Image: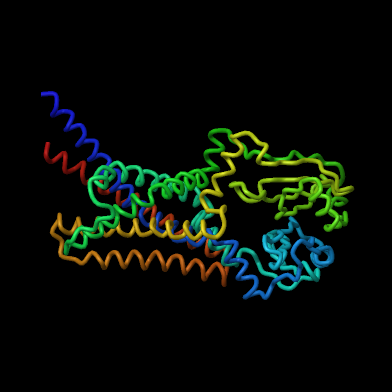
Amino acid sequence: MSLQPTVSGKNNKKQFYWQLHHWVGLYTGILIGLLSLTGAMAVFIPEIDALVQRHHYKASSTLLPGELPRINRAVNSLLVKYPKQRGLSIILPDNPENAVIIELNTPQNKGKTQRYEFFVDAGSDRVVAHRPWQSSFVNYLRQMHVRLFEGKWGRQLVGFGGVGLTLVSITGLIIYGNFMKKQRWPNIRKATDIRIKMADWHKIFGIGALGFNLVIALTGAWLGLQPWLQKWLDIYAPGKNKTHIIMAPKKDRAINIDWTSALQAARKAFPELKPRHLIPSSNGAGTITFRGNLPGVIYERDINMLVLSKLDYKPLYKYDIREQPTADKFYYIQEALHFGDYGGLMVKVLYTILGLTSAFLSISGFVIFLFRRKKKQRLVGNPWKAIVFYTFLSLLFLVTIAIISMNTSYSLASKISGVVINGVLIGVGCYLLIMTLKKVREKRKLI
């Protein structure tokens, strides 16, 4: 007497998890596929950009290993050429053979600014090339992966994609975990039905990449929803330095910095730091901020910090992640885990392979759904047409936005992407509303 409710309860739970896996996977599948594909490439952003600089812009450096970069003349020449610039910053490469990048926000028409990157040969101290940052391929790749080029709330939409991947991964483990333990793994059934074969591959890849998908999903959800979560939970980014205004902004910007001396002072004050981002103040604080990395740790890039005085290059503030509380370390480990930015090239290769399995799961799940729907409803059409159609549209979207962003206008690409994404969301919302109303009417007829 007591056994039946227990079995029924287990069946109801399994049915609930299956329905959750089914519908969440169906409505987030394309989003997860796009993010997986762009993410598989985004892990190589530094390497891709280095190749673009060397081969497209012919930008490299003749600096010898161990030497400090020579950039004084290049920086001063740019400041003379662009006296109304805003937001000067300098990016040092990980490889001394690559060019140093000087970033300048230059005024444009109607009060707008354009961010340019100037490539400097740090051996000869001269500017060799430049580019508008927004038109670069690596900027497209990051913006597409981080916010789908939708500036208003695209980042949060990507965060919801991470939530969806989390639910799909967990429910997939609950549904197929015991089933996979009872059979030889991996096992592909010998069947002519494409749905059965694809279902077996779907289970194998899903269980095999489960740990990776959960890491990517949870960190992606946090990074995407971070603006909202920080506001709701009153969380602030740790390690921020509170500067004090000690002079007029005009006087601050006019101070001539000897970058070689500043780098020597930074090396003495924080020997383990590998500085990557050098930012002189322009608000009257009279400081130079050095952001960089420490060897042998897994944290977000450029979070370790040293602040020097512009006047005498003495240290004013130091932030070493190794000395910080656990909460700070947890906050700054998310991005490194998400992009595989630790452990070298082989870790990134592994991230790319596993990332592509997530894209395969979104496609295979759609295949299973369409073939099961055809069999259940006895439909005549060929499901492969729909699969090819949606795959083609997704790739067309990625390629079109890339071409517009890199050759025409970043803002135009963002507007088009916003129209497409919000149009799809409105369409899906209307479809769900219509289907819900239809089911309500059918239930009323039965009553």
What is the x, y in percent for residue 107? 73, 62
At horizontal 21% and vertical 62% (from top left) the residue drawn is 194
Residue 290's place in the image compared with 327, above or below, is below
What is the x, y in percent for residue 422? 43, 55
Q: In the rendered image, is residue 284 in sight?
A: no
Outermost residue toward the top in this view: 1
In this view, the residue in front, 106 or 6, is: 6
User: In which quadrant of the rendered view does residue 277 lie?
Assistant: bottom right
Residue 344's place in the image compared with 214, above or below, is below
Describe the colour scheme in one phrase: rainbow
At horizontal 50% and vertical 43% (from top left) the residue drawn is 222
Q: Is residue 353 left or right of residue 391?
A: right
- Count the marks: how many? 0
What is the x, y in percent for residue 407? 57, 72
In this view, the residue in front, 327 or 419, is: 327
Q: Is residue 67 left or right of residue 113?
A: right
Q: Is residue 384 left or right of residue 270?
A: left
Residue 320's place in the image compared with 73, above or below, is above
What is the x, y in percent for residue 360? 35, 59
In this view, the residue in front, 162 or 354, is: 354
Q: Quadrant of the N terminus?
A: top left
In this view, the residue in front, 88 or 326, is: 326
Q: Quadrant of the C terminus?
A: top left
Q: In the rendered image, is residue 220 in sight?
A: yes
At horizontal 40% and vertical 54% (from top left) the residue drawn is 32
